[in-house]
Image (tube, helix red, strand yellow):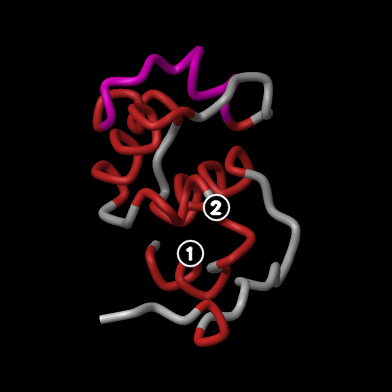
Amino acid sequence: MKINNRDFVPARRHVHVTSGETIRILREKKGWTQNELARRSAISATNLSMLENDRLDIGKRRALALAKAFGVHPAIIMFPEYEPRTIAKAA
């Protein structure tokens, strides 16, 4: 099967939301503290604070750990600007 590039369209950005803002939104919608999320994700509360304030890069391992804790796909955390409706439904 040959793939034709004309069959695909680039994803469009819906809103500008950072990974840190997404983490905070999901955490607050769940009613969790940073300490609770730290327990559920095995990421320290200090690192969670740095992630939420966009002072630490998310990285694949952290995105996977957070996605598992929240019960969402890692792409929602790593690329939140493309799936805002999914973020709202996830929490």
Amino acid type at image mark 1: Ile
Local secondary structure at mark 2: loop
Q: Quadrant of the N terminus?
A: bottom left
Residue 48 counted in the magenta span: yes
Could you tell me residue 5's position as x and y percent? 53, 77
Numbered label attached to residue 14:
none
Residue identified by numbered label 2: 79
Amino acid carrying label 2: it is Phe
**Which of marks 1 and 2 precedes in the sequence?**
2
Q: Which residue in the protein does label 1 denote? A: 87
Give the structural element (helix, strand or loop) at label 1.
Answer: helix
- The x and y percentages for residue 27 are 45, 45
Residue occupying the point 39% across, 14% down: 44
Q: Is residue 17 above or below residue 85?
A: above
Residues at marks 2 and 1, CA–CA distance in whole angstroms: 11 Å
Crowding at dot 2, Cα within 10 Å, few <14 / some 14-19 / many 20+, comes out as: some
Task: Say left or right for 42 vs 19.
Answer: left
Q: Which residues are magenta?
A: 41-51
Q: Nearer the viewer, residue 2 or 85?
A: 2
Is residue 34 positioned above or below 1 on the image?
A: above
Q: Residue at x 70, y 67 (%)?
A: 13
